[in-house]
Amino acid sequence: MRYAFSYSLPLLALFVALPAHAADWYVSPTGAGTTAAACPTRDTPCSLASAAAGAVAGDTVYLTSGSYQQPLFVANTGTEAAPITFKADTCSTPIIESMASVDADQTSGVHSEVGEYLVFDGLVVRGWSTGFGNRWADGTESTEVSNGHWTIKNCISYSNGRTGFTFFSAANFTLTNSISAHNGTSTAHSWSSGVTLFEATGTNLVQGVVSFENTDEQKHTDGSGFIVDEDTNGASFINNIAFGNSGSCFRLTKSSGTVFVNNTCYHNAQFGSQAMGPSNPSELYFTNGGVTIQNVNFKNNVIVGTGTAPAGSQAIQNQPTSGWTTNLVSVGATTLFAAPDGTNPDFTLAASAMTAIAKGTAGAGTPTTDVGFDPKCLVKRAPQMFGMVAGLGRWQYDIDIDYVTMKGGVAKCFNGGMRAGTPDIGAYKSGAVATVESCVPKPAGTGVISGGGGAGNVGGAGNVATGGANSSTGGGATAAGGAPGTAGVAPIGSAGTNAVAGGVGTSAGSGNGAPPASVDSDASGCGCRVASSRGSELPGALGLFGLVAFGIVRRRRDRV
């Protein structure tokens, strides 16, 4: 017997568009599972190495909280329609860290030799040679294109021997709402900065990144907060903050068409008399001025130099003659910021900053939101270093990982507020920064809704939200004749309690219980509120990646 099948073109297109495989992996520092089928929930997690080696296009790897003392080396590649995502589990702070202390080790914390269309969300990486980096295409004059299309968001890369975030010889890199600090203390390897783009092509965006106290202790040449390096044309830097770096806030080399809008630079060029090539890195340094000033768009930036010779005696070297609009430039002390040298360095605009408030220029490149960085994610104290090498005596600030973890992940450090009307100058809009309430990771064995056979599952507990309501999302499934799932129980907030009953099980025995309505909660039972004058809500904690890493040996001709 012959059967005839008829499909409409839209329906056929839908089938074609679907990825061949899309699985959720849960991993933990002690996970033992080795396949996606073995770790579809946090109850039975896989190892990070297994997920890194096995995840394919369309898969999402959720990393639960804890210390992963191994690199993350992504073995496969995603596609534009189906990237591979490594993401922090809800309210979690996974830390990819090295316990080694060998300066010559070139291992990267998060790396891939082949992976394209990769997303890393919510990871903390520390103690390696390079924090995040793709494959290096050999040769400074090589036309070889490496593995690109990376998106990194809500991540921290710090205390690495060389660079925090590096993107080599490839197209389309996005880095948003992240922190890079205390990188570059290796005395065996150089060309170090907080964020480096080298021969990067296509669309490259760095937005909402805080880069501070990075250095280059081998050659004393780089050590910048951000660097647009050799043939990286048309890159955009929006709403970033750089302070206390040994080199420049922002350095450009043999690149053109750079967009640098609504950024804040403060007291970089900390090398002092140690600075080499150049000896005066300043806040902004346009190396190869005839190239790097071409077709640029520099506007609405606050640039405050140290004024200390020779490294910071002036704020800008080789300033562009065009494409330079409404930037505030000064040296020494400033009254523009709330507390730039405070216990929690605060670069929000002071109420009296009349030269910055509503003095910017709208139009191309001007962002609709500000950085929204919570100053409490940083604290004034000698930084704790990990892995490669020791810190420097001149460093004054540390990332408060305990605070970040208590809040529920790196994403909670960023809560951008909407800009309205004539834009302010700098990375922040005027006014208070929104903060979010704490968010606690879900433990294994709770909050998982599943169906089939017997009594329903117990709903997960909600989280405390000061002054606000909480809810669980627990739901139960029942088999025919079984009892409905047990209600999820939410703890008591300081000014309100809410526990929502678990969903009613299905009568068929294989279906899922219907989840209850929730208040400020997600599918894992994490309740998080924004408490701020800005009144906007921060999405649930974002996440990141898991795998194992390779050595990157970087070659580059000397800059002139």
Image (cartoon, rainbow, N blue to C red):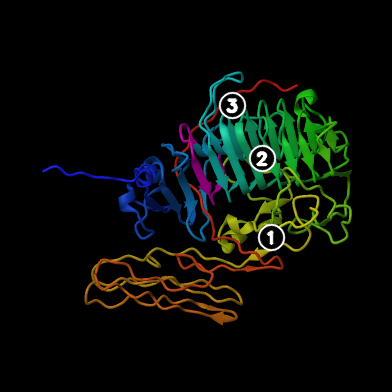
Residue 194 disc label: 2
Relative placement, left or right, of 63 versus 437 is left
Secondary structure under the numbered disc 1 in the rendered image: helix
- Can you tell which quarter of the image residue 7 is in? top left
Report which residue position mark 1 lands on: 376
Q: Which of the two residues, 473 or 108, is positioned nearer the viewer here?
A: 473
> Residue placed farthest to the left in the image?
1
Residue 428 disc label: none
Report which residue position mark 3 lands on: 554
Quarter holding the C terminus is top right
Residue 263: x %, y % from top left: 75, 46
Which callout, 1 or 2, points at the residue further toward the start of the chain? 2
Residue 5: x %, y % from top left: 23, 45
Q: Which of the two residues, 351 or 74, is positioned nearer the viewer here?
A: 351
Would residue 220 be seen by someone viewing this image from the given angle? no
Q: Which of the two residues, 390 or 348, is positioned nearer the viewer here?
A: 348
How packed is label 3: few (under 14 Cα within 10 Å), some, or many (20 or more)?
some
Callout 2 amino acid:
Gly
